Image (tube, rainbow, N blue to C red):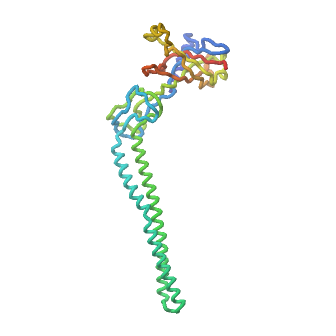
């Protein structure tokens, strides 16, 4: 788009120097008429591959009207689906381990028994001193300490199992994303303008597969003279855009009293006014207008057409 803008600006400058056209043909307190405006795209996207692989199917063709997130192309996903199945099984195992707290419960039960044995031995010695040898009591206390430490070990293993389950789930999500990214979707509402690849070709991440352009909203670009129209006077102003057509059958429609939809002006408003006044005292301006379709589904305005834009100054 940037190169196209430069090319258009250079063309307009050359035409003005040669005297072939004047950017503004008429102006008044109510409106400004700008001739020889360029009809340009607002959005044109070279849709890229996000994963490497072989193209297996195109869901659309050139000229197809698509919606945002509509399926465009399928990249071979057999390998990623196998990896997804493996990741899901690993997650299932990890989840089972994460839900298993039997070792923690067993360790706590063993610790309770060991503590009870120590308490019982000490109680016996209080009633009958020397009934339980000190060596045995120390051994029971050691068993109690080990049992308490085993509870900590079991709890740690349980916590690790929880984290492992989370890791396995993340791995499932990663592989799912890989599968999803192999189904290329349209980033915008638009029309498929061209295909760069064919079924069976290998693509790398970032490599363009097809071009989608937006046709329901287009940009009308032109130049105004700074000494005739102040930039601050046209920001956000409504516009009417007309394009001259030669259509077969227009005379028949006129004879029947019908208004040819191609001749109706297109409406929009000024969206951009350049901050730079170029050589010759002119500055760049563009408006965005709503395009429309003929009854048979063809767009009326097309990028590259030359249009006349009327900027409404009166409130």
Q: Is 19 in front, or is 212?
A: 212
Q: In this view, does 37 lie above or below 107?
A: above
Query: Residue drawn at (43%, 67%), measured in percent from left and top?
Result: 102
Residue 241 percent location from the top left of the image: 55, 17
Q: Is residue 72 above or below residue 254?
A: below
Res. 26 image quadrant: top right
Task: Find the residue positioned furthest to the front.
Answer: 256
Q: Across the whole image, how many numbered discs are drawn on residues? A: 0
Q: In this view, does 94 lie above or below 232?
A: below
Residue 201 percent location from the top left of the image: 33, 34
Task: Find the residue positioned furthest to the left.
Answer: 200
Res. 126 image quadrant: bottom right
Residue 71 percent location from the top left of the image: 41, 35
Query: Residue drawn at (53%, 86%), measured in percent from left and top?
Result: 123
Q: Is 269 in front, or is 304?
A: 269
Q: In this view, does 18 lie above or below 230?
A: above
Residue 171 percent location from the top left of the image: 42, 51
119 left or right of 233? Answer: left
Q: Quadrant of the C terminus?
A: top right
């Amino acid at each position: 788009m940037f190169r196209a803008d430069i090319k258009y600006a250079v063309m307009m400058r050359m035409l003005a120097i040669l005297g072939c056209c004047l950017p503004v043909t008429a102006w008044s307190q109510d409106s400004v008429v700008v001739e020889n405006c360029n009809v340009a795209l607002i959005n044109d996207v070279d849709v890229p591959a996000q994963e490497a692989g072989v193209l297996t199917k195109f869901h659309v063709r050139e000229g197809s009207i698509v919606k945002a997130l509509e399926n465009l192309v399928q990249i071979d996903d057999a390998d990623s689906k196998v990896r997804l199945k493996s990741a899901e099984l690993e997650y299932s195992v990890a989840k089972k381990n994460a839900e298993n707290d039997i070792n923690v419960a067993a360790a706590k039960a063993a610790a309770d028994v060991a503590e009870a044995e120590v308490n019982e031995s000490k109680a016996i010695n209080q009633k009958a001193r020397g009934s339980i040898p000190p060596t045995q009591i120390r051994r029971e206390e050691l068993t109690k300490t080990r049992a308490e430490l085993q509870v900590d070990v079991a709890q740690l293993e349980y916590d690790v199992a929880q984290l492992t389950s989370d890791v396995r789930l993340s791995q499932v999500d990663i592989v799912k994303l890989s599968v999803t990214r192999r189904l290329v979707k349209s980033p915008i509402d638009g029309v498929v303008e061209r295909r760069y690849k064919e079924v069976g070709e290998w693509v790398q991440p970032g490599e363009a597969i097809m071009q989608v352009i937006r046709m329901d909203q287009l940009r009308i670009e032109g130049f105004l003279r700074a000494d005739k129209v102040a930039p601050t006077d046209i920001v956000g102003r409504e516009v009417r855009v007309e394009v001259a057509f030669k259509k077969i059958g227009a005379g028949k429609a006129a004879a029947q009293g019908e208004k040819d939809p191609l001749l109706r002006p297109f409406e929009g408003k000024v969206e951009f006014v350049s901050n730079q006044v170029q050589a010759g005292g002119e500055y760049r301006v563009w408006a965005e207008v709503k395009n429309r379709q003929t009854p048979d589904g063809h767009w009326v305005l097309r990028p590259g057409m030359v249009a006349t834009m009327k900027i409404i100054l009166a409130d």
